[in-house]
């Protein structure tokens, strides 16, 4: 009997980002962009390496190790053996999540030009 693998729900939510990275594989060094990030993994567009291969993701002067889980011609999904808890990628993830949680009205009010004249003095 064939075993059917049922995907498990992700323990961390994915967050949309746009982070330029360099991915170092065994035989190549390629530039890509992380477009989807969580503490446990990422989707990298513009870079592709064979599934199950190991790589290094260079971002913000630090290296994060990863394993390629799936790969297509122009993108791949990677899993981090150690969840992100600190460092530049984690900070970028935190900033992106905080930006998503801001009420659009607050952005409008904070970017609004100050009022002049009597109305601005009250």
Image: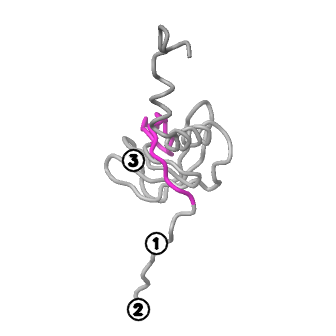
Residue that label 2 marks: 1
The image position of residue 38, as x and y in percent, is 54, 51
Instruction: Identify the residue at image location x=56%, y=58%.
Output: 12
Of badges 3 and 1, nearer the viewer stands 1
Q: Relative to residue 115, is residue 59 depicted above or below?
A: below
Is 114 on the left or on the right of 46, as rendered? Answer: right
Q: Relative to residue 74, is residue 13 depicted above or below?
A: below
Instruction: Identify the residue at image location x=63%, y=48%.
Output: 84
Instruction: Identify the residue at image location x=36%, y=41%.
Output: 46
Labels 2 and 1: the sequence-earlier one: 2
State which region is magenta: 12-34
Instruction: Identify the residue at image location x=37%, y=48%.
Output: 75
In magenta stretch: residue 111: no
Labels 3 and 2: the sequence-earlier one: 2
Q: Residues within 10 Å of mark 3 (few under 14, many from 20)?
A: many
In magenta stretch: residue 24: yes
Could you tell me if residue 28 is visible in this image?
no
Main SS, magenta residues: strand
Q: Residues within 10 Å of mark 2 (few under 14, many from 20)?
A: few
Residue that label 1 marks: 7
Residue that label 3 marks: 48
Between residue 93 and residue 66, name the one nearer to us: 93
- Spatial separation of the CA atoms under disc 3 and disc 2: 33 Å
């Amino acid at each position: 009997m064939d075993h059917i693998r049922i995907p498990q729900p992700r323990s961390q939510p994915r967050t949309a980002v746009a982070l330029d990275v360099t991915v170092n594989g065994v035989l190549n060094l390629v530039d890509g962009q992380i477009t989807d990030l969580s503490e446990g993994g990422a989707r990298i567009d513009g870079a592709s390496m064979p599934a199950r291969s190991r790589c290094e993701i260079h971002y913000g002067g630090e290296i994060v190790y990863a394993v390629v889980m799936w790969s297509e011609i122009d993108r791949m999904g990677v899993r981090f053996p150690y969840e992100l808890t600190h460092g530049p990628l984690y900070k970028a993830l935190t900033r992106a999540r905080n930006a998503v949680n801001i009420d659009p009205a607050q952005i409008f009010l904070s970017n609004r030009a100050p009022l002049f004249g009597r109305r601005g003095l009250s």
